[in-house]
Image: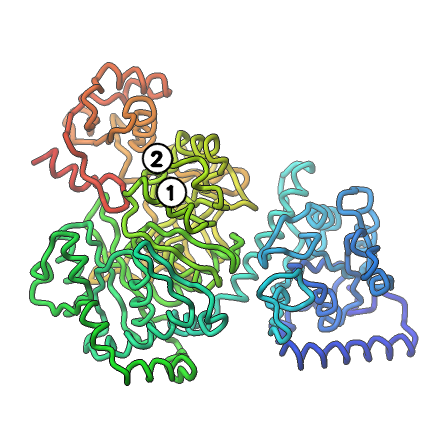
Amino acid sequence: MSERGAANPAKSLLRRCYEETLRLLFKVYLKLVHRIRIEGIERVPKAFDRLIVVANHASYLDGVILWTYLRLPLRIVVDRAIASSRWLAPFLKNDYIVPIDFMNPYGLKDIVRMVGEGLPLVVFPEGRRTSTGSFMKLYDGAGFVAYRTGAPILPIYLKGTYDTFFARKHKGRRLLAPIVVTIGEACPPIDFGRLPNRKRKGAATRMIYAMLCGLYLEAHARPSTLGREFIRACSRGRGRKLFGDSTGARVSRGKALLGAFALGRSISRIAEGNVAIMLPNLAVTAVVFMAMQLYRKAPAFLNYSGGPRGLGLAMELADTGTVITSRRFLDRLRLTDAVFGPRRCIFLEDLKAQIGAGDKLHALFRTLFPGRLGRARPGEEKETAVILFTSGSEATPKGVCLSHENIITNVYQGLAKVDVTGEDCFLNILPMFHSFGLTAGTIIPILAGARAFFHVSPLQYRIVPELAYDNECTIMLATNTFLNGYARRANPYDFRSLRYIFCGGEALTNAVFERYARTFGIRLLAGYGVTECAPLISLNTALQYEYGTVGALLPGMEKRIVPVEGIDDKGGTVGSLLVRGKNVMKGYLKNEEANQKYLVEDAGWYDTGDIVEVTKEGSLKIVGRLRRFAKISGEMISLAAMEEVLVRELAGRKDLAVMAVSDDRRGETLIVVTNNPGIDQKSVREALKAGGFAELAIPRRVQFMKEIPKLGTGKIDYVRLRELMLG
């Protein structure tokens, strides 16, 4: 080991004075102009024999900041093309810069030698300044140096340098952009185990990417509340559009903040803490939701597709005596306020009419001086921000309490992997009572500086593609069922502006994936989540993608794979998935038995109930729901895998489900339920045999049902289906 700086020959007094003077000048500029804050400086190793510093690269200030504050004899790796450019060459010709051609593997040999000699090296794995503000492609050079030298890695995240004038030109640049530097824990040399040498470079690069994503999360997901974050996001760029919807509403950030304060003052007079919301998927619903966040009310979103029984159960679980709804919306659903029983109804039409001049002036004052409404009390991030209800596709719906910390963490877990910019427009056709529609489709656009366009129904297959086209949407969220419907109606030009389409809520089928690739030239990105995890767990992205999977686990999460009896665990890579992280819920409403197991017995590990396979690249592949397996003569049979084959080969545009019923002789037997009268036992047998299923798994009966019950998300309602079969 050698002390910091001892790896170089002793410097002359003149050189030391020169360096300290430069550092002082840089510090004065950074402190006065950018109010720079350094977090985790104590994590910089005091002694080392080798060290690699990796950081995101957003501006020309990045290297200056690291050299100024780390106080190490750093060598900063710079792309040779940049180092020789006309304007930068005079500043980059010095002892601290190491020009390198990232495309030339021979150029890395000198870098490996320097690290081996004890010189701490700064590497920007992206090799260029980001043009999105998010991580871009990482070159394998950093991974190569890491695995060849076996050096510890110090990850650093520079937040805010993308907003300075030293970044690439974009609309968000500011003269006084604040900068926060977050220094992570130094990671020991990467252990590659028995991984072949040819794969170590790529594995090291993926590990460096995971380190930087984890540090991004640490830098952004700070203790806060949704109300406070809403004020922060809308206070900047108040004239920029935030929400729009198919009714013609267009709401700027400033108007959304003003409306939330005005509505929130009226809502704050409601005595109880939990208030139910049953409103359509429109901009006003997002504003009402944020109004409740500002005034510390916990909204309980009611799933209006679940029928009167589901509504009653949800309101009883949430202990709410008040429902915010709309007369026009109730008329559209062909319901009356009698469906809410004795509870008080506040109609949005009346709420708007009650807002007077005094309320508007007060709201305007609060947008400028939010006071206590813009501050978070110590520990408030742990309080319930929203109550959502599980879909109940396989069991009775549960009330899920998600805290501010759960949702804010999940937002930045997603943003660590997806490059969302202020130019993006989300097309959100998923209702806000759906966790995917709330977190990914509503809250992420707010906090990321983007905008969101809402539509009331995902089932309008002709209209949704037109909305994507008319509003030049760039990101769309949907389920496989809805995407299949849009593909049949859309013109190939309708989706021309879409950069990403994320598919969640159910398995993405090969047929839908291929149709979008061939017809629209779009690669669908499958993700995975559950309401209890706010909801994102894993995600395929443009930067980290593996076909046939739901992507890698998001940063800030841990996983456990628990073997399942009757299923080959393939060396510990297949089993029931348990996850843990700050995005995992507080707990269930009025379900002490489930909370005891989750919080106490399982020590905060949430059992997803899904069986997954972890690929060699670290992605998750969904094998099926544990409840969607049947045990026949001791063998575990995946009903979801069977359905996928039958839907692809036989169902066409009709619906199909495989159900397991008890059988005295074999434990369980399988039945195919479909609304396609052309499917019979023989065709089912032939399709499954061709799909590789054994004779043991062949369903013994095909049952025709005119209408297969579905949930609001488009998924089959297996609970209701079983009731109809047995009833």
* Rendered position, 218 above or below 607: below
Quadrant of the image occupied by residue 269: bottom left
Quadrant containing the N terminus is bottom right
Label 1, label 2: how many angstroms apart (C-alpha)?
A: 8 Å
Horizontal and vertical percent position of residue 277: 22, 63
Cβ atoms at labels 1 and 2 below 8 Å apart: yes
Compare residues 320 and 357 and report the one nearer the observer. Answer: 357
On residue 465, which mark appears? 1
Quadrant of the image occupied by residue 653: top left
- Evaluate whether residue 524 shows in this view: yes
In this picture, residue 91 sits left or right of residue 409: right
Residue at 20%, 66% (x, y): give it.
324
- Evaluate whether residue 620 shows in this view: no
Horizontal and vertical percent position of residue 198: 69, 36
Q: Inspect the image, locate mark 2, and give the three-letter code of the amino acid beneath it.
A: Arg
Residue at 63%, 39% (x, y): give it.
194
Specify few, some or many for label 1: CA neighbours under 10 Å numbering under 14, 14-19, or 20 or more.
many
